[in-house]
Structures are given as C-alpha cells and as structure tokens.
Amino acid sequence: MLIQPASPRQDHWPLLLLADPDRAMVERYLYDGQLYEGLLPGEKRPLAVAVTLPLDGARLELKNLAVDPAWQGQGLGGQMLEWLCAKAQDRYEQLLVGTSRFGVSFYAGHGFAYSHLAEHFFRDNYPEPLEENGEVLDHMYYLARDLRRNAQEGSPK
C-alpha cells in the first residue's frame, strides 16, 4: 500500500466517518492535522485514511484511522499505523490514540499501552449516542506508544 499525505477531498469523508461518525467532530481536527491516505497501486480511491495532530513538541495524536470495510481484516490498518509511527519517530517521542474499548486490543497489538481514561467522552461530546458492536459507547480509552523504541530498534519496513 502506498501511503502519502493528502489534502481533504470528498472521497475521504466516507472513510473518515467510519472512525468518527460525527462530521462536526472530524472537522474540529481535520484541518489542523495532517491527513494521510493509503492507496493500492493503480487505485485512485483511498482504501485507508489517518489523521494526526501534534499535541506539543513531544507528542502526536492519532485522531482518525479507518479502512474501507471491503478491505478490513487484511492488515491495511496495521500497515498504516506502523508507517505513521516510523514517520513520526524522528520528530515525536510518543504517539497517543483515543479509542473505544473495542479498539484497545488492536492498538495494544501494535505496541500501545494504556495511558488514561476520558470518562463519559462519547456521551459528553456527541449529539447522539454512539454504538459499536451493539453497545452504547461512553468512555474513551487513551493508549500511547513510545516512538523512541522504534528509533532504537530501527524503523519497521
């Protein structure tokens, strides 16, 4: 998969809204952050997207990561995540991500560890209840990955 920076386009929105279904919430970080798209050779339509946003000089936050449903389960999300970590390691010490409890195992499998909990984040920040796997979401789980570990071990290929 070719991963590259991109300017927001209309064809990114279906993917962005998979990870964060409230357009107003996405707009709060999309234009201040950096959007990346993942393309397969010969494809013009992105199959994956991610948005990162600097928090300070040492920390970068992954605000959105989504893969087209037809391509989920084939490693594209993990590939995008590892690419982002490798790209960020020269400038940042840590990559932070907030997710529902259903996303914790995905990030933990990529070297992220629990950081903190934002209680009632989904309930307090979205106009309508959000559901995932038939459950109404409430708390946001933050996980962090030490990017200096990547630099010491060498960037993933």
Image (cartoon, rainbow, N blue to C red):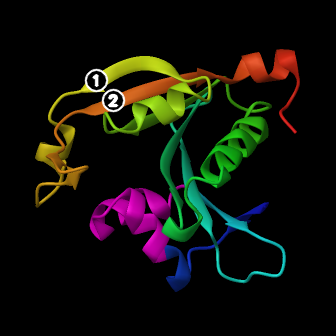
69 or 8: which is nearer to us?
Answer: 69
> Looking at the rendering, which quadrant does residue 25 occupy?
bottom left
| Residue 117's disc number | 1
Q: Position of residue 26 (x, y in %)?
A: 38, 62
Query: Is residue 75 on the magenta stretch?
Result: no
| Mark 1 residue type | Leu
Q: Determine if residue 96 is in view.
A: no
Q: Position of residue 73 (x, y in %)?
A: 57, 53
Identify the main secondary structure in magenta: helix
In this rendering, position of residue 89 left or right of residue 48: right
Q: Quadrant of the C terminus?
A: top right
How far across and how far down the image is residue 106, in percent? Answer: 50, 35
Q: Where is residue 10 shown, x and y percent of the image?
A: 51, 84
> Counting other residues with Cα less than 10 Å from the Cα at mark 1, is it few (<14), some (14-19), or many (20 or more)?
some
Element assignment for label 2: strand
The answer to which image quadrant residue 156 occupies is top right
Left or right of residue 105: residue 82: right
Q: Which secondary structure, mark 1? A: strand
Among the 4 quarters of the image, the one containing residue 72: bottom right
Label ID, residue 153: none
Label 2 amino acid? Tyr
Please give the range of residues in magenta: 13-33
Estimate how packed mark 2 is, as few (under 14), some (14 to 19) or many (20 or more) residues with alpha carbons within 10 Å.
many
Could you tell me if the residues under marks 2 and 1 are in contact, i.e. CB atoms within 8 Å? yes
Q: Residue at x 38, y 67 (%)?
A: 17
Q: In the rendering, which numbered label is found on residue 141?
A: 2
- 68 horizontally vs 142: left or right: right
Question: How many numbered marks are there?
Answer: 2
Q: Residue at x 52, y 24 (%)?
A: 144
